[in-house]
Image: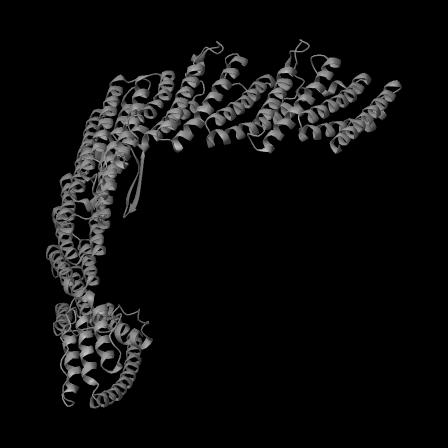
C-alpha cells in the first residue's frame, strides 16, 4: 500500500510539473519573439546594459561601464551573455541559495524583456509561491528523499523474505546504496547545482541525498552488529561514530539540517551499541570528540541551534551516567565537564573573541554542569566520598570560563545559583528538592551527609573566590558593559553572604555567635570599600551605578547579619532600627540612589522582627513594669531613627525612599504608644484576648492624635505620605469608633462596669474624650483636608457626644452596670427625650456659630429622633404628667426652633 501511494503521488506530481513546464516554454517562445522585435527596433542595447547592471548588483560586483551602442545584428547576443555571467556568479553556499539565487534569477529573467529599470532600493516582499512551485521544488524533493530511504529498507526486507541473498550480501548492498546516495549528492553539488527559486533552499537535493545515504549507512552498521553479529561492539561503535562525525563535517557543504542528523546519530550510537563490559572512558572520550567536532563545524557557520543540541546531548549522557552507575567515577565526570568547558571556551566562543551579547548556547552547558555539581554535593554516597570537593572544583571551572569569555556569562549565574542552593539547603536543615525525571534520574530530598568542617572550608573558599573575582571583574567591566559588571558584583556579594548565613545558622549559635559576627563586620568593611573603589572608577565618577549599588547593598546586609549574630533579640531590634539612619546620613557625602533604599531595607527588617515578636525580647522577659520596659526602646528608637532618616533624605537624595521612611516613622510612633498602652492596661500581657473598651478608647485617641500630627507635619513639610497617611488614619479611627465603641464593646451590650466615679469614668474615657478629639481634628482639618474628611470627623464627634450623654443618663438611673436587660423607668424614658431635644438645640446653635452645615444637619436628625421617640414611644410608655410634659416640651422646642430660623432668614435677607 505504501509503495502504491508513493507511486501515485509521484505520477500526479510529474504530470502537473510537465504540464506547467510546457506552458512556460510556450510563454518563453512568445517573449523571445517580442525581444527580437525590440532588438530590431534599436531598443536592445540600453535594455541589455541595464540588465547587466542589475545582474552585477545581484551577485555583489560593480556594474560594468555602459557599452557603446552596437549594430542591430550584434545586440541579440548581449542579453544571453549577461544572463550567463550572472548565473556563474550565483552564491554556492547552501544557506545563501534561496535568497541570493532567487534575487539573481528574477533580475536576469525579468530585466531583458520587461523594459523597466532595476529598482535602486530593495525590492518589496515577493508573493508566496503557488502550489505548482511548491510541488515541483520542495515536496517532490522531500518525498523523493523519503522514498529513497524507505526504498533501501524495503529492498533489504524483500531480499530477506525472498531469500535472494545472504545477510552479508544484503548488508553489502545496503552499504553500497548508502555510499551511492552520498556520492550522488556530492556529484550533484559539484556540478554546479543551483536553486533559483524562492523557498528552494529547504529542498536542497544534494543535502537530502547525503542525509538518505547517512541514514542507510547508520542502519547497515547497526544491523551488522545488533541483528547478525558480524562485527563486535567496538568496531560498530567506531564505525557509527565515524559516520556521525563525517555527516557533521559534510554539513559544511550541505547545511545545518544534515549536521543535526549526524549529531543525532552520533549521540544515539552509544545507546544502540550494547556491551557486557562497557568502557566508560571510551564512551565519554567519544562524546568529547563528537562535541568538539560539532563545535568546530558550528563555529564556522555560526549554527547556534546545532551547538546547543550538542551540549544537550553531552549533558544528558552525563546525568544518565550519574543516575544509573552504582558509583560514578569522579575522574570521568570531571573529564567530560572539563571537555565541555574547553569546547565552549576555545572552540565555540574562540580564543580572544569578545561578544557584546550573551551567547545563548552557553546557557545549556551552564545548566547541565550546575546540575552535575549539585548532584555531587547532594547525593548521599557522593557526599560521603568527597563529591562536594569535586563539585566545588566544577563550580570554579564555570567561574573561570565566565571570566575569560564574556559571552559565557550564563556560567556565572549557574555557578552562583548552584552554590546558593547548596548552602541554603544546609541552613534549612531539610532537604534539597532536585527532581529531574531524565531516564530514571530522580533525586528527591537527598540529605547532605557531610561533616560541618568540610562544608565550612568549601564555603569559605567559594565565598572568597566569588567576592574577589566579582569585585575584580566588576572593576574591569564597569565602563564598557555596566550590566555585566553588576552581574559579577551581585553574585560576588550574594554568595559570601549566603555561605556566612548558612554556616552560622547550621553550625553556629543562633542567639549569639561573636566569631561569625566579626567575619560579618569584616565583610561590611570590604564591601563598603569595594563599592567606593568601583564608584571612583565610574564615568562620571561617584554616580553610584548598579555595580556600586550591589556592593553597598551587600555591606548593608552584612551589617544586619553582624547585629543578629552578635547581640540578643532586644538589642538586635534596637540597633537594626538605629542602623537605618546610617545610609541616610551617608547621603551627605555621596548621592548614591541606593543609600535611601538601604534605609528602607533596614526598616523592613525591623518591621519583620516586630511582626514575628511584638514583645521585642519575649513575653517571659518583658516584665510588667509600665512604660519603662523593652517596648519603649524597641519601638521608640527605631521610630526616631526612621524619622531622622526621612528628615535627612528630604534634604539630600529625596525621592521614594524618603516617603517610605516617613511612613514607617509614623507607623512605629503609633505602634510604640499603642503597645505601651496595651502592656500597661493588661498587666504586662501583650498577647491578651479582645481588648477592653478602655484599651480600645486609648487606641482610638492615639489614632485621632496621629492623624492630627501627620496633618500638622504635612503643613510644615508637604509630603504625599503624610497627606494620605493622615487621611487613612482618620478613616481608620472612624471605623474603630463605629465597630468597637458603638457595637462590639458598648456597655449597653456587654454590661461592662463603667466605674464608681461620677464623671471621670469609663464613659468619659470611651466617648467624651474621643468626641472632643474628633471635633478638634475636624475643626483643625477644615481647609487643609477634603471637605468630606472634616464632615466625617464632625459627624462622628456628634455621635460620640450623643452616646456619652445618653449613656451617662442611663448610668445616673442604673448605676455602674447599664446593660439593656435592666429595663427602663418612667423618669429615665422622659429624661432621654428632654436630653435629646436639648442636645439638638445645642448642635443647632453650634452649627450656626461655626457655620457648619454638618452640625446643623446633625441637629435636625437628633431632633427628628426625639420627635419620633415622643410620638412612638413616650405616648404609650409614659403616664400622667410625664406624658404631658414630654409633649409640651417637644412643642415648645419645635416652636422655638422655628422662631430661631425665621429670625435667621430675616437677618440674612436684610
Figure quadrant of residue 474: top left
Image quadrant containing the N terminus: bottom left
Report the label total.
Answer: 0
Relative image position of residue 835 (x, y in whole percent): 76, 20
Q: How is the image coloured?
A: one colour
Relative image position of residue 806 (x, y in whole percent): 72, 20
Is residue 597 rendered to the left or right of residue 796? left
Relative image position of residue 765 (x, y in whole percent): 62, 16
Figure quadrant of residue 143: bottom left
Relative image position of residue 556 (x, y in whole percent): 30, 26
Residue at the front extreme of this rendering? 910
Is residue 350 rendered to the left or right of residue 724? left
Is residue 649 shown to the viewer in this render? yes
Residue at the right extreme of this rendering? 880
Figure quadrant of residue 98: bottom left
Depth check, front residue: 682 or 894: 894
- Decide: is 183 above or below 810: below
- Decide: is 623 above or below 128: above
Image quadrant containing the C terminus: top right
Is residue 691 shown to the viewer in this render? no
Is residue 862 rendered to the left or right of residue 691? right
- Decide: is 521 above or below 218: above
- Decide: is 434 above or below 570: below
Depth check, front residue: 803 or 724: 724
Amino acid at each position: 500500500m505504501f509503495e502504491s501511494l508513493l507511486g501515485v503521488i509521484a505520477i500526479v506530481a510529474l504530470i502537473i510539473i510537465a504540464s506547467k513546464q510546457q506552458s512556460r516554454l510556450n510563454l518563453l517562445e512568445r517573449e523571445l519573439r517580442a525581444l527580437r522585435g525590440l532588438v530590431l527596433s534599436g531598443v536592445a542595447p540600453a535594455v541589455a546594459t541595464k540588465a547587466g547592471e542589475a545582474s552585477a548588483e545581484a551577485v555583489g560586483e560593480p556594474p560594468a561601464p555602459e557599452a557603446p551602442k552596437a549594430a542591430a545584428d550584434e545586440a541579440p547576443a548581449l542579453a544571453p551573455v549577461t544572463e550567463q555571467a550572472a548565473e556563474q556568479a550565483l552564491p554556492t553556499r547552501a544557506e545563501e541559495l534561496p535568497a541570493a539565487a532567487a534575487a539573481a534569477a528574477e533580475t536576469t529573467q525579468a530585466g531583458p524583456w520587461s523594459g523597466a529599470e532595476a529598482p535602486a532600493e530593495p525590492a518589496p516582499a515577493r508573493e508566496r509561491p503557488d502550489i505548482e512551485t511548491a510541488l515541483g521544488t520542495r515536496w517532490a524533493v522531500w518525498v523523493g528523499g523519503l522514498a529513497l530511504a524507505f526504498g533501501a529498507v524495503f529492498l533489504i526486507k524483500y531480499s530477506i523474505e525472498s531469500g535472494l541473498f545472504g545477510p552479508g550480501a544484503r548488508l553489502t548492498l545496503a552499504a553500497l546504496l548508502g555510499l551511492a546516495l552520498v556520492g550522488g549528492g556530492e556529484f550533484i553539488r559539484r556540478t554546479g547545482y543551483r536553486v533559483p527559486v524562492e523557498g528552494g533552499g529547504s529542498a536542497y537535493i544534494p543535502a537530502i541525498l547525503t542525509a538518505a545515504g547517512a541514514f542507510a549507512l547508520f542502519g547497515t552498521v547497526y544491523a551488522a552488529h545488533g541483528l547478525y553479529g558480524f562485527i563486535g561492539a567496538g568496531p560498530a561503535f567506531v564505525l557509527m561514530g565515524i559516520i556521525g562525525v563525517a555527516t557533521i563535517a559534510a554539513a559544511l557543504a550541505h547545511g545545518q539540517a544534515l549536521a543535526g542528523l549526524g549529531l543525532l546519530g552520533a549521540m544515539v550510537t552509544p545507546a544502540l551499541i550494547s556491551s557486557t563490559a562497557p568502557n566508560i572512558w571510551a564512551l565519554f572520550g567519544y562524546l568529547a570528540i563528537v562535541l568538539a567536532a560539532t563545535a568546530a563545524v558550528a563555529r564556522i557557520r555560526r549554527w547556534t541551534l546545532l551547538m546547543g543540541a550538542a551540549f544537550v546531548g553531552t549533558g544528558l549522557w552525563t546525568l544518565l551516567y550519574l543516575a544509573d552507575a552504582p558509583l560514578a567515577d569522579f575522574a570521568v565526570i570531571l573529564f567530560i565537564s572539563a571537555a565541555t568547558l574547553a569546547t565552549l571556551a576555545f572552540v565555540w566562543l574562540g580564543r580572544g573573541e569578545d561578544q557584546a551579547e550573551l551567547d545563548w548556547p552557553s546557557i545549556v552547558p551552564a545548566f547541565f554542569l550546575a546540575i552535575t555539581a549539585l548532584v555531587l554535593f547532594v547525593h548521599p554516597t557522593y557526599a560521603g566520598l568527597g563529591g562536594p570537593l569535586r563539585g566545588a572544583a566544577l563550580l570554579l571551572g564555570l567561574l573561570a570560563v565566565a571570566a575569560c569569555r564574556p559571552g559565557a556569562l550564563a556560567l556565572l549565574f549557574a555557578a552562583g545559583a548552584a552554590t546558593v542552593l547548596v548552602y541554603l539547603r544546609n541552613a534549612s536543615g531539610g532537604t534539597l528538592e532536585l527532581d529531574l525525571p531524565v531516564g530514571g534520574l530522580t533525586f528527591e530530598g537527598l540529605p547532605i551527609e557531610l561533616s560541618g568542617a568540610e562544608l565550612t572550608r568549601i564555603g569559605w573558599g567559594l565565598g572568597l573566590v566569588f567576592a574577589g573575582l566579582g569585585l575584580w571583574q566588576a572593576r574591569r567591566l564597569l565602563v564598557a558593559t555596566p550590566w555585566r559588571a553588576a552581574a559579577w558584583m551581585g553574585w560576588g556579594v550574594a554568595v559570601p553572604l549566603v555561605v556566612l548565613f548558612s554556616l552560622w545558622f547550621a553550625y553556629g549559635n543562633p542567639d549569639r555567635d561573636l566569631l561569625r559576627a566579626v567575619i560579618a563586620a569584616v565583610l561590611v568593611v570590604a564591601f563598603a570599600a569595594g563599592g567606593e573603589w568601583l564608584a571612583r572608577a565610574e564615568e562620571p565618577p561617584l554616580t553610584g551605578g548598579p555595580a556600586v549599588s550591589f556592593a553597598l547593598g551587600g555591606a548593608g546586609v552584612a551589617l544586619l547579619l553582624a547585629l543578629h549574630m552578635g547581640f540578643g533579640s532586644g538589642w538586635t531590634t534596637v540597633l537594626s532600627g538605629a542602623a537605618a539612619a546610617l545610609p541616610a546620613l551617608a547621603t551627605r557625602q555621596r548621592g548614591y540612589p541606593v543609600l535611601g533604599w538601604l534605609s528602607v531595607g533596614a526598616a523592613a527588617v525591623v518591621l519583620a522582627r516586630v511582626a514575628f515578636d511584638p514583645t521585642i525580647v519575649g513575653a517571659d522577659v518583658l516584665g510588667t513594669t509600665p512604660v519603662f520596659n523593652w517596648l519603649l526602646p524597641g519601638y521608640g528608637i527605631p521610630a526616631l531613627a526612621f524619622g531622622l532618616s526621612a528628615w535627612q533624605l528630604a534634604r539630600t537624595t529625596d525621592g521614594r525612599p524618603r516617603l517610605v521612611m516617613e511612613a514607617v516613622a509614623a507607623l512605629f510612633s503609633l505602634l510604640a504608644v499603642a503597645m505601651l498602652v496595651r502592656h500597661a492596661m493588661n498587666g504586662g500581657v501583650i498577647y491578651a484576648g479582645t481588648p477592653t473598651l478602655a484599651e480600645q478608647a486609648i487606641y482610638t485617641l492615639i489614632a485621632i492624635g496621629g492623624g492630627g500630627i501627620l496633618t500638622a507635619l504635612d503643613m510644615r513639610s508637604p509630603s504625599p505620605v503624610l497627606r494620605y497617611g493622615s487621611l487613612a488614619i482618620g478613616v481608620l479611627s472612624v471605623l474603630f469608633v463605629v465597630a468597637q465603641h458603638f457595637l462590639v464593646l458598648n456597655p449597653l451590650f456587654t454590661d461592662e462596669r463603667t466605674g464608681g466615679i461620677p464623671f471621670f469614668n469609663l464613659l468619659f474615657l470611651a466617648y467624651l474624650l474621643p468626641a472632643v478629639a474628633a471635633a478638634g481634628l475636624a475643626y483643625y482639618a477644615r481647609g487643609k483636608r477634603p471637605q468630606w474628611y472634616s464632615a466625617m470627623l464632625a459627624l462622628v464627634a456628634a455621635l460620640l457626644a450623643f452616646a456619652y450623654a445618653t449613656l451617662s443618663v442611663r448610668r445616673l438611673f442604673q448605676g455602674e452596670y447599664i446593660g439593656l436587660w435592666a429595663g427602663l423607668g418612667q423618669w429615665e424614658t422622659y429624661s432621654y427625650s428632654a436630653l435629646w431635644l436639648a442636645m439638638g438645640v445645642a448642635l443647632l446653635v453650634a452649627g450656626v456659630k461655626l457655620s457648619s452645615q454638618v452640625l446643623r444637619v446633625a441637629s435636625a436628625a437628633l431632633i427628628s429622633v426625639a420627635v419620633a421617640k415622643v410620638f412612638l414611644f413616650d405616648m404609650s410608655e409614659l403616664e400622667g404628667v410625664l406624658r404631658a410634659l414630654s409633649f409640651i416640651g417637644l412643642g415648645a422646642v419645635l416652636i422655638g426652633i422655628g422662631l430661631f430660623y425665621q429670625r435667621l432668614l430675616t437677618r440674612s435677607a436684610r
